[in-house]
Image (cartoon, grey):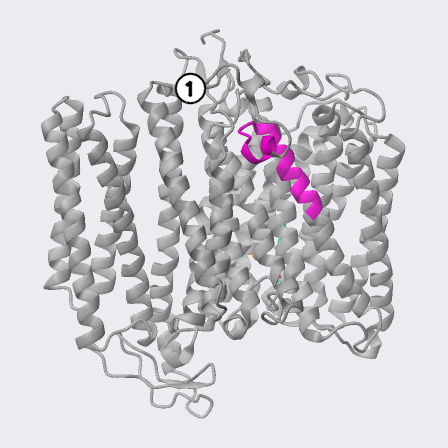
Amino acid sequence: MATETQHYYVPNPSPYPFILSSGLLLLTSGFVFKMNNFAPGVWMMFLGFLCVLYVLFGWFGKVIGESESGQYREWEDKSFRIAMIVFISSEVAFFAAFFGALFFVRNIGIPELAHFDPSLTPYKGFTAIWPSAGPGGMVLGKLYEVAKFEPMKPLGLPAINTMILLTSGLTVTWAHWGLVKDNRRQLILGLFMTVVLGISFLLCQAYEYHHAYTEMGLTLGTGAYGATFFMLTGFHGFHVLLGTIMLTVILLRSINGHFKPNHHFAFEGVAWYWHFVDVVWLLLFVLVYWL
Amino acid sequence: MSTATTTATHDHSHHDHHAPSGVMRWLTTTNHKDIGTMYLTFALVMFLVGGTMILGVRAELFKPGLQLMKPEFFNQLIGVHALVMIFAALMPAATGFANWMLPLQLGAPDMALPRLNNWGFWLLPPAAILLTAPFTLALFGIGDGAVATGWTLYAPLSVQGGIGVDFAIFSVHLLGISSVLGSINIIVTIFNMRAPGMTLFKMPLFAWGWLITAFLLIATIPVLAGAVTMLLTDRHFGTHFFDAAGGGDPILFQHLFWFFGHPEVYILLLPVWGFIPHILSAFSRKPVYGYKAQVYSFWAIGILSVVVWAHHFFTVGMPVPALLYFMYSTMSISLPLAVLFFCWIATMWKGSMSFETPMLFATGWIILFGIGGLTGLVLADVAADAQYHHSYFVVAHFHYTLFAGGIMGIMAGVYFWLPKMTGYMYSEKLGKLHFWMTAIAFNMTFIPQFFLGLAGMPRRIPDYALQFAEFNMISSIAAFILGLSQLILVYNIVSCVRGKGEKAKDNPWEGAQGLEWTLPSPPPYHSFTEQPVVK
Ligand code: HEM
Ligand SMILES: [Cu+2]
């Protein structure tokens, strides 16, 4: 609890939350319409997306303005820090669901499927191996045939991506040291390298996906293996994308002279997020690519 | 501890002159009381909406045979009723109280993150629209109605379902974002906004209950979000998470869902366990008994609640060690729960009790929620559950916990705090009438359902065998009385808000303790411009 600065900043009424929620309503309902082949879906999504973009710029712009004009002091800063830690914890739980799904299908679902009494199961002769795309059979009234596919290997691109992300964790820390020492050149250079590494990671992943789809026969529809692989690495990649965008914003703000050695929550929040993304990747590398 | 005072500063200190009025006030507000009021109003409206839906169900079940609706529509009503009541009535009501009361009880200028707070609320109406719109769309020939899978959204039924499932998936996403935002705000407020001297162990139990609720939400809501995301990709993007032909497993969905779903039932109740002791203490004119024991029990229940989920599908075919583990861990929850019951009763013990409406609800709540807990123990027995699973016994069990334990607890809070929030007293006579009508009609609705379940009537079925007719008829009649009785609640609230009735004193209850009672009724728009110092 703050005892020195006893003013807490309570912002004025703001239109952004309401516009954002309306945008999300349009975006989600539009998406439902689109998936079920109703024409206006795409347009609703587009409109909703515009709302979300407008709010992203407006709301974050406002917060940055408030921060730079000195409205946030220690007390507010502490609120933001706790909030960021709790938010990242919720992200951990989200990934845990997908890791849990991987564990379940691999260690419980598939072995059970393989050990059913042959006289009772339609999936005769299915053996429990991993990676597996399942025994094949009827899915939603259509025949699902197991195609031949090649599983991912840890060496090569995934190992390179691991190096890239680990290095980026170092560069962002180096940038932080620069900020604390008020060495702006080090701050900007460190952030720039982190952004470049983030983008390289995404490019490698795009190449990996392309390769999987075109040459390895591995797609989202490749049974349990394809589903867990693409959803886990896909959501991770999406988080890397978000993290890279946030790092870019921080980089541009640094170039514009934002942040002080003792006042830079936004920088640290993004850095924490980046480390979180890093740790998730290490888990992915071990549990999805390697084991 | 410093005695410095706090003022809640606004970016332009003329806020009160420039604050938007009319609708814009509510759309843009960053004030915790405004936001709390919106949450509570929304909860009341959705409570009536969800109640109306289930009256449709009870009307169909009045007699054996199909009379009023197609089975598909019956299924939609049941599923949307549960989702509405849990996510759009009970949870927002508890969040509304948190918004209104936590800053007052902790001596804070406002919630820690006021704009996020507003966003958390405004995600709810879109979520409710997504959930219920398919009913209307079906009238225009778009889709085949709302989600018809029950609130549990089990695969493979939900993989095969219509457009309603897609709407429900995104509704759950928006509700989830809202809950996460609300939890972030509450955790930050509790850790960072307490007045000087308000140590964690001086906080009202309501703050403790909500703190643990918020932790549970952060740990489990994202798992539900993950589960429905897998459902979405299974439905539209060709994945095989829940399909054995692809090596997936429909039981995976049940694990993921109940990993969220069981903690969810404590998420719904912990805030209520938080304020009920203070009501009991106020009307017994005695301090809360066993404050620390209650806090530790909250923690114990919170932690245990994430490791017992599979008791919801004992019959699905699990290895025996797993069955035993989930049985014993589930039953062990009743130990800390028993500590709580003991503390509630001991709080009243030898007190000079009086039975105003909040106290009637609180004491009735102890008994009825107790029945809910005890029947839970019956269900937690693996062998017994083989018989009772998916029967009306389960329906009766969770209505004793959720309607009595949840909603009637919330009603105790409503009558307790209504004078504080509106500045006017409700009519004690009508309040008592509301309690007795509710309590009697509730028992008449759900006691027969225990017997129906024991006799083997399955839940979620629009038609039933002839031998179940009498109990169903009693249950349906009582359900309509129960529904209509809630109009008294609406009347009581509206007349307080409109300032009929007596003016409320700062502390209308002789024995009520806590910072919120030191403020005028209703409290000023910005409560603690001078931060209080707690000794
Ligand atoms: C000691 C306390 C409790 C125990 C041992 C217990 C045990 C159980 C068990 C074993 C089931 C599954 C029955 C079946 O489907 O066969 C169940 C269902 C349920 N319980 Fe409890 N319960 C307890 C308290 C509560 C509380 C406090 C709540 C709510 C606030 C609650 C809400 C529910 C709900 C909603 C369901 C049914 C969900 C569904 O299938 O739709 N229970 N309970
Ligand atoms: Cu449970």
Residue B1 lies, with reference to residue B233, above or below; the image says: above
Please state which amino acid type lies under the numbered disc 1. Met
Q: Position of residue B316 (x, y in %)?
A: 53, 72
Q: Main secondary structure of the magenta part?
A: helix
Q: Label 1: how many residues lie within 10 Å, few (<14), some (14-19) or many (20+)?
A: some
| Residue B26 drawn in magenta | yes
Q: Looking at the image, which residue is at 47% across and 17% down?
A: B12
Query: Is B276 displayed left or right of B318 in the figure?
Result: right
Residue B161 lies, with reference to residue A254, above or below; the image says: below
- The residue tagged 1 is A1
Q: Quadrant of ligand 2?
A: bottom right
Q: Position of residue A92 (x, y in %)?
A: 35, 48
Does residue B312 appear anywhere in the picture? yes
Q: Looking at the image, which residue is at 48% across and 28% down?
A: B189
Q: Quadrant of the C terminus of chain B?
A: top right
Q: Position of residue A66 (x, y in %)?
A: 37, 24
- Per the rendered image, the range of residues in magenta is B24-45
Q: Looking at the image, which residue is at 51% across and 64% down?
A: B166
Does residue B274 appear anywhere in the picture? no
Foreground residue, A206 or B449? Answer: A206
Name the secondary structure under disc 1. Answer: loop
Query: Is B239 displayed left or right of A165 in the figure?
Result: right
Q: Position of residue B45 (x, y in %)?
A: 70, 46
Query: Is B434 displayed left or right of B222 in the figure?
Result: right
Residue A61 lies, with reference to residue B265, above or below; the image says: above
Q: Quadrant of the N terminus of chain B?
A: top left
The image quarter containing residue B135 is bottom right
Residue B98 lies, with reference to residue B395, above or below; the image says: above
